[in-house]
Image: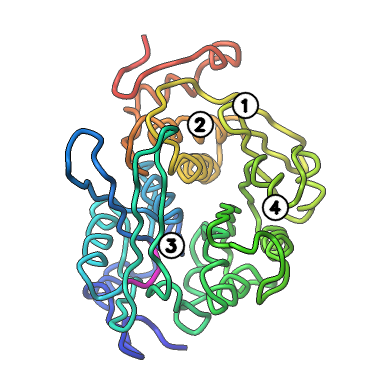
Amino acid sequence: MSRPDQSPGGLSSAGSANGARKARGAQRLDVIGLGESMLALRWSRHGKTFDWEIAGAESNTVRYCAAHNLSTAWVSRLGTDLAGDLVLQGISADGVDVSRVARHAGHPTGVMLKEPAADGWQVRYYRTDSAATTMAPDTVDVAELLSARVLHLTGITTSLSESCRELIAALVARPRPGAATVSFDVNWRPALHPEGVSATAAGSAAEMLRSTANAADVVFVGLDEADDVWNTATPRGIRSLLPDPEMVVVKNSGHGAYALSEGGTVCVPALKGPLVGTIGAGDAFAAGVLAGMLRASEPVETWLRRGHITAMSALAHPADVGTLPDPGTINGLLSLSPPKWARAEFKMGESLP
């Protein structure tokens, strides 16, 4: 199996990967995320300029996990271009280990363009034949990824290429060589399936996503996504389609979220707060839930609260990844009684009274 630090096929590693791995030793990472990240250009509403940021569901999630003081890594491929440099530097600056990211001279880094629209932002992707589309089971160390406490994946990667589908299939297949909890966010992107949910190289897109999600341990999916892909719009209906995961977390937009497991169903209302942009909120929510899950003493209700709190930092910021509330605010929200939680509302940067 080829490794990024061995530079096969025109690849180079991100920084001194060998040295970084030696320094890590046998330390087990809390969360590893695998998937494509792109350079995002956001047109300023107030002037003829672009602001740049990083777009990528999996890297968004691990960046938020890092903000929750978890040890994290992001695994992907980038081009040997300025866009790749900026993506790598930005994710690393948020405390995420990027030593497993390979650079591919023959393929570019993907780019996303955010244009102002009446209801927020219109997004256009320029990712065809990007470096990330070349990911495959023989380009990463599957066993190493599954050695983390949590491996976070999304349905976006299954849509990038046939080799990416094969990689995700290898990572979710049972029995697994490692002890990782595999987290899978459906993250339905219609733009990646112009044919809708009709036939693809791997069969129906709907069935591909369902079977992949059903092989995971923890699944995140929105009611709207489930309705679009599986024509199912109730938490119980979704759970019946996904009987095997230990937990299925169903998000109902700004209303709340459900966690369905053998222990029953837990529902927590969404947290009220400012709405600046919605992109990245689902990734942030997943990070909060995973951060709670990795705290063994916390109940499922608190996991969902952490998800809502983390999502607020995305909703209150124009970029995909914002700043978490201060620890005092987070702890104050987590300690609220259910009735007070349901009424709670705050602005980012302000502590609760």
Q: Label 1 amino acid?
A: Val
Q: CA distance from mark 1 to mark 3?
A: 31 Å
Query: Along the polypeptide, which appears first: circle 4 or circle 1?
Result: 4
Q: CA distance from mark 3 to mark 4?
A: 36 Å
Q: Label 3 amino acid?
A: Arg
Secondary element type, mark 4: helix
Main SS, magenta region, reads strand
Residue 34, given in percent of the width and then of the height, sits at 46, 64
Q: Mark 3 vs mark 4: give the one in front.
A: 4
Q: CA distance from mark 3 to mark 2?
A: 27 Å
**Residue on which disc 4 sits:** 229
Give the total number of marks visible in the rendering. 4
Q: CA distance from mark 2 to mark 4?
A: 24 Å
Residue 132, given in percent of the width and then of the height, sits at 41, 72
**Residue on which disc 3 sits:** 28
Q: Mark 3 vs mark 2: give the one in front.
A: 2
The reply to whether dot 3 and dot 4 touch (C-beta < 8 Å) is no
- Tell me if residue 271 comes above or below residue 143 in the rendering: above
- Residue stretch in magenta: 74-78
**Residue on which disc 1 sits:** 268
Looking at the image, residue 100 sits to the left or right of residue 205; the answer is left
Query: Along the polypeptide, which appears first: circle 1 or circle 2?
Result: 1
